[in-house]
Image: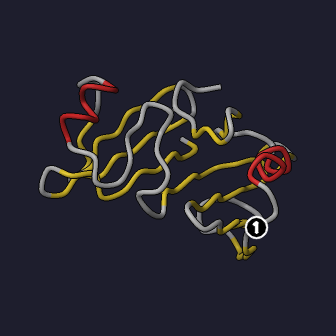
Amino acid sequence: VSKYYYEYEKQKIYITQDIEEAVGILGTGYEYFEAPSCASDGLDMFYYYQNLTLMANEISGKKVVTDIYFKNDTVSTPEGIKINSGYLDVVNQYGSDYEMNGTALEYVDGNTLFTVDINDGKVVSIEYEYK
């Protein structure tokens, strides 16, 4: 498990986790949508929860989490960073070992790309992606 993950009721949701396990933790309060994948073979499977979206893909025959996207400021990283947090809060929590991609700070650990997009000194989006 990467050092970058989302936590819900003391349980980790992380990139390459079995999607059934992740949904088992988050519960059934989601809308489901699937479409042919642009990035990989097979389907992109979307689980739209009130505060975040999970995407799953099939990798090596297993359906796993490939994206976790925060939809609003009611959810935060285990370190307390959320939408509207300040740039300095992010750097104080995660350090300056990031790559800039436009306005986004990109942190990498293993197969996880953790992206925090900044606009006017504030966090505007948070996403964990399969790399």
Q: Residues within 10 Å of mark 1 (few under 14, many from 20)?
A: few
The colouring scheme, among rainbow, by chain, secondary structure or one colour, is: secondary structure
| As drawn, 87 above or below 3 | below
Tell me where residue 41 sits by quadrant. bottom right
Q: Which residue is mark 1?
A: 29
In depth, the one of 4 and 62 nearer the eye is: 4
- Quadrant (top left, top right, bottom left, bottom right) of the N terminus: top right
Judge whether 126 appears above or below 99 on screen: below
Q: Amino acid at mark 1?
A: Gly
Residue 34 image point, x, y percent? 74, 74
Count the marks.
Answer: 1
Left or right of 125 in this view: 33: right
Give how far across and how far down residue 118 sits, in percent.
Answer: 23, 52
Decide: is 49 above or below 114: below
Residue for point 25% across, 34% down: 89
Q: Split into 4 quadrants, where in the image is the C terminus?
A: top right
Q: Residue at x 58, y 44 (%)?
A: 130
The residue positioned 49% from the left and 57% from the top of the image is: 70
Q: State left or right for residue 91 relative to residue 33.
A: left
Q: Is residue 71 above or below residue 78?
A: below
Residue 8, image x and y in percent? 65, 42
| Residue at disc 1, secondary structure | loop
Residue at screen point 73% across, 76% down: 33
On the picture, is 56 further left or further right than 86? right
